Image: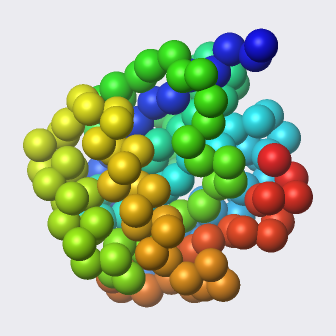
Amino acid sequence: MNTLDQLVYCSRARLAPEQADEQVADIVHVSAFRNAQVGITGALALRDGVFIQLLEGSPTALDILMLHLHFDQRHDDIVVLARERIARRAFPIWGMIAPRNAPSTAVALDALIAGRSSRLDLWRQAMAGCLAAASPQTEALDEGGVISRLSTRSRQAV
Ligand SMILES: Cc1cc2nc3c(=O)[nH]c(=O)nc-3n(C[C@H](O)[C@H](O)[C@H](O)COP(=O)(O)O)c2cc1C
């Protein structure tokens, strides 16, 4: 069986206000393409200037991605909050989530962000809840912080 790790990190967004939507859209598209190539799945959220990303894949693929992320000037202050070996993926597709559409789960997400929680199970729950609540067809960004769901493309590719 292939070894799988799951991690969650947070970072501070360094997006130019007038280009934020464009920059996030670029991150989403590049990530969907590259993650599919290396077998990484997960979810990304942007809440009040903080990126939260839950990633799962082979330990090597995750290490390489984290290296790229450290050099990416669209964010800084990257802190890996938790990392664990997992038996199976919690996120079979990769997408961004829109907490705006999921008030109750967004509250949970915001609380985890505020506390910089190291509980991967809680992050999984909150991120999955937001993803489930987001419209599957949405691929637009808004000032509420979110998101897109890259359903078809990512499903095919992963
Ligand atoms: C918050 C954030 C999340 C990102 N997530 C991913 C990701 O999941 N997968 C990915 O390949 N690139 C992701 N990127 C982009 C990478 O940092 C990097 O730009 C991309 O992998 C291309 O790397 P390269 O320019 O060195 O070729 C993300 C960037 C940011 C700012």
Query: Which residue lies at the image location 52% right of the left edge and 53% below the top edge?
Result: 43
Residue at 80% across / 70% down in the picture? 152
| Residue 60 visible in this rendered orientation of the protein | no
> Is 109 or 25 nearer to us in this picture?
109
Return the residue nearer the eye: 110 or 131.
131
Relative placement, left or right, of 15 versus 68 is left
In the image, residue 19 above or below residue 119: below
Q: Quadrant of residue 143?
A: bottom left
| Residue at 45 percent of width and 56 percent of height | 128
Q: x%, y% of residue 137?
A: 66, 84
Above or below residue 58? Residue 104 is: below
Q: Is residue 79 left or right of residue 38?
A: left
Residue 144: x %, y % from top left: 33, 82
Q: Nearer the viewer, residue 69 or 88?
A: 88
Residue 36 placed where, x, y %?
79, 46
- The answer to whether 134 is drawn above or below residue 87 in the figure is below
Is residue 156 rendered to the left or right of residue 95?
A: right
Image position, residue 83 (x, y; %): 41, 22
Quarter holding the N terminus? top right
Indicate whether 37 appears above or below 18. Answer: above
